Image (cartoon, coloured by chain):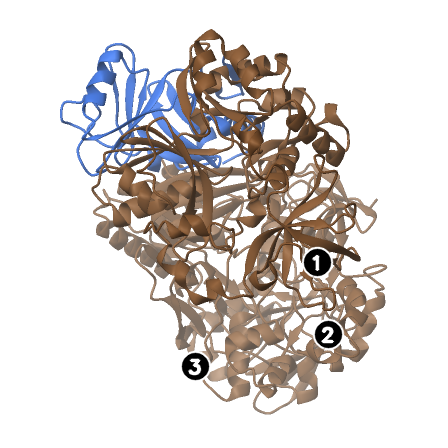
Chain colours: A brown, B blue
Amino acid sequence: MKAAIKRVGTRLSDKTLRFIFDGREYEAQVGDTAASVLMAHGIFALGRSVKYRRLRGLLAVGPEEPNALLTVGVTPMVIPNVSAPQLQLREGLVLKSQNRWPSLRFDVASLLQLGSGFFGAGFYYKTFMWPSWRTYESLIRRLAGLGEAPGASDLPVAAVEYLSCDVLVAGAGAAGLSAALVAAHTGARVVLVEREPVLGGELEFESALVDGQPATSWVTATEQMLQTLGVRILTDTTLVGGTGGVHIAHHEPGGLAGHNKVFHIRSRVLVIAMGAIERPIALINNDLPGVMLLGAAERLSRRYGALTGRRAVIFANHQRAYAAAARLVKAGVSVRAVIDTRSAAVLEQDAVTARHCASLQVAGVLCLSESAVVSAKGWRTVTGVDIQHLRSGKAKRIACDLLLTSGGWSPAMHAGLQGGGTTRYAADKATFTVTDQPIGRVTVGASSGHFELAAVLSEAASVTARVMSELGLVSDGAGIPMGLGDPAPRLAPYWRAPCTPSQEKRQFIDFQNDVTVADLRASLAEGFRDIEHVKRYATLGIGTEQGRTSTVLGAAILAELKGESIESVGLSRPRPPYHPMTMRAMAGLRVGSALRVAKRTPLHDWHVSHGGVLDPMGLWMRPRFYRSNGADAAIAAVTEARRVRTTGGIVDGSTLGKIEVVGADVAAFLDSMYLTKASTIKIGRSKYMVNLREDGMVLDDGIVLRLAADRFIATTSSGHAEHMLSHFEHYREVDWPGRAVTLTDITDAWSVIAVAGPRSRAAIQHVLGSEWQSRIETLTHMDFAQGHYAGVALTVLRASFSGELAYELHVGPAAAVALWEALVTSGLEPYGIDALDILRVEKGYLVSSELNGQTTPGDLNMDSLVRLGNPCVGRALLDRPAFHEPTRGRLVGVRAVDGCSGFLAGAQLTTLSSTQPLGYITSSVFSPTLNEWIGLALLARAQAIEGATLIARDPLRGQETPVRVTSTVHVDPTGERIKS
Amino acid sequence: MSTHVQTESCWLVRSVAVRVVEIAAFDASSTAGDGLGLPRRPGTVTGTDDGGSSLYFAPGRWLLVGPSAAFEARIRAAAQWGSWVEVTGKWVAMTLQGPGAQRVLASTIDVEATLQGRECAAVTLFDCPSILVRDELGFTVWVHASVASDWVAAVERLGAALTVTTG
């Protein structure tokens, strides 16, 4: 084990913990991140790049870090792509570097670097074409991708919280705190989210003063004030997306998926104060471990006491580099040189810079103006840099093990470019800022291009005050904080150091995707000139860091290559989530059995306890069959169906949709909704009816019961109640506004037990008792009677979906189980949905696959209903010629010619001599009544002739079965059973 | 029949069945006044002398819980105005109380925004069609009977999850 190297930092404690990195145990201090402790141990290479497998070290310390991504856990329970600088270590964590095999130090695939000249942008698209992409797929998939996908997970379900506020402030740096203060003082409900575990942002590093006190003290006092004012502060929480005024914030303590929480925050105003991101400068080999951003080195030093190198060179294009250099020197870093691209004349005009230069030179730091680091030297890590004077071309080499670059800052623009918002180039700051924000969204501070503390504080306060006043909320006296911090950067745009064209393939822009200057040049050569096209062709700005360090740099270099201004090139638009989050966190509570709601009938528990095998059908859980009738589904279903035909059975039909339609106008309304008239149904009678869509296709079918002159119950097929209710409501609102029609879903208010078979009447009479005897005796087909059972309302409807003498018992859920058990006791055994399907197909009744949204009444042999001429929704379009062409399918029955061969739904029907499909089998079952396979099929009208012989071809199973076209009614064609 | 679910910070009781009726006006924009005794303002709840209550839960829609015979007669007599539909068994009442009750509901809906200026609202809670009612002791949630088991399961899961989350 490598013992901890004792350090002092603002986020470290003296306690230690142990973790494993690439199989070796290390000791860290509590508070350490994976990056900080590994760098403290002198481990600068933390991973390999995805494409060329080049060794990579830390570039940044925030969500913009493109290189140092680790896999946490042990296969298969891993979490890939965890950002090392954000991963707060916990006892016993197991970490693994990514994109390498067998080890980080030696990776076989790193040999790809030797061919990097051939692997430019577009290489995959052009190369792996012959003989087939499949030839290479396996190898490429093994090499591609970031990290290892988890094969299993023991992560807890992410918590979810919905909340609302007047103002959501994203970011708790100087600007965010200033904005939150102003908003809170107006009495508004404020939520403040901050991705770091502590508030303050950049104030943690600047030796600044706010309101005359050290910035860190002001942050502490402000946090207390905000809490006093009732502001809800969410740390370790990042704004990751949102739409329509609802913003998504992701809480991930310690930077590792585990106890995540997803906030859905509805706010009237979103204040984006997410700061700015330091960007690198492109130079040869700028991806070597040991090349990192200046700000990252400062953070590692202050927070974790981690010195990222012993001899540093700083390369920048702005004044703040000198103050940072002075702080690093103070922290113990040997800064060898500060290389500034700006001219000596510019530097001399700036007294602050001149003073810093002088003191640095006294400390032995070389300060070079109008110069650039053109190349980082070294193999596995930086060993030196080549410097060139930009005017004279004079070269110089300095030995170092750390190159700190800073090319300026890019405002965090992701949140400001969703649902509106555009960018504008600010030449004086050499960056883009967001503009044209929609109502209710503003950017403040560094997010809006302000980089000086005083300006940040005052602009955030004034912008927020203006927005609050637009809401009618006025501050009760919050003053504008006065800040004194690092001076303005006085930045001169500088994007990449000079190099030859052949060296451009080692000037990296997007580290995560190995995008180089050469790749942008290749994109242009291929005709991909727009920034959005370049992004996709060269993979610029995609991945976990979402182009935070590369988008603006890429746009600037693209502008140079195109010979255009950077304004005209513009930026690509980022997409949410702005910050990576696990799929599990995105799923929120919808995980496992909670993925979707399951509907249960009042008889659900009875089915489960009596061997019912339940399957989801739509959202409903329904018993397919009962194990008491056989362990095999097919055998059990046949047994159950045979029993219904011979004696009888009961099935749970509670899933049938039921809509109560009430009002003086409902008869006419229902006439308009069904193919046949409801107004002709007598009270106490019911009717089988069919709905059409507006285009004439059959939408649904069911029985409509007339309870009174102004009251009907329309039943729908299982799972269609919500859809049919919506369908009815649409036409009521559109075509029947103000008319006396109400619609109420009563599906859950009534359990339905369907009793079928020769013994059904006797069983019902026995169970319901004497008061029902004569009423049931006199019920004719489609009659119903109402009364009570065990004190609960009961409707007995004589209707059949099996072809047998059958009744539906609609009873209140409170009495459902008692009634069911009484029927079972009377000798009727339950059957499942599989048996019901057999009974339906035997009788030629429609099963769900015939109502597939593509069949008309004519297709389903309902011509007689159409001829009645009821002008309902969809009726007019039934006369379309296409619906009557001879090639259009019509429902027929089919049976195997040999009387014993099977065929399955989906098989195509062809003539004996052709493989041209003429139709297909929609439903097929083994009929226990006929002792053979039977089916329903949609067959071209021209061939839908009873007695014709066709082939049922099932190429997937390699089956070809000769079948005979029959009537759709296979059993009891005269309906004797149903009338008995 | 009742089911009790106790978590660290809240408790839920699935209440016994009561008679429930839905009232719907033919014209959703018409007022409920007219001497019918229904709540007049959307989102409000009124009680009756005999222990029943009326929830104005959606445009032109009321839920009557345990209506008295007299009340029923009055509403039925106004047949030109709207409909009376017996829905006993359609809804299951869940009583959610305790300091963590609102936090449980906040896992599926913005409670404050939903009930701002109202006492009840038709909503979707844990993907289940529901009517949310805030009262003095906490919340009563009317859930479709077919999904009530899933609703209870969601609360049970949250009971475990909420003890470990922060923020």
Q: CA distance from mark 3 to mark 1?
A: 70 Å
- Residue A312 placement, left or right of A630: left
Can residue B105 be seen? yes
**Measured along the vertical axis of the image, is residue A15 above or below residue A939?**
above
Residue A57: which quarter of the image?
bottom right
* Outermost top residue: A770
SS at mark 1 in the image: strand
Label 2 or label 3, whichever comes before in sequence order? 2
Q: Position of residue A531 (x, y in %)?
A: 51, 77
Kindly identify which residue carries mark 1. A949
Q: Chain of mark 1?
A: A
Location of residue B77 with respect to A256 vertically, above or below: above
User: At label 1, which amino acid type do we have?
Assistant: Thr
Depth order, front residue of A132/A567: A132
Q: Chain of mark 3?
A: A
Q: Mark 1 and mark 2: span between their CA atoms?
A: 85 Å
Residue under label 2, please give it: A384
Image point (85%, 67%), residue name = A108
Q: Nearer the viewer, residue A627 or A850?
A: A850
The amino acid sitting under disc 2 is Gly
Secondary structure category for the residue under label 2: strand
Q: Residues within 10 Å of mark 3 (few under 14, many from 20)?
A: few
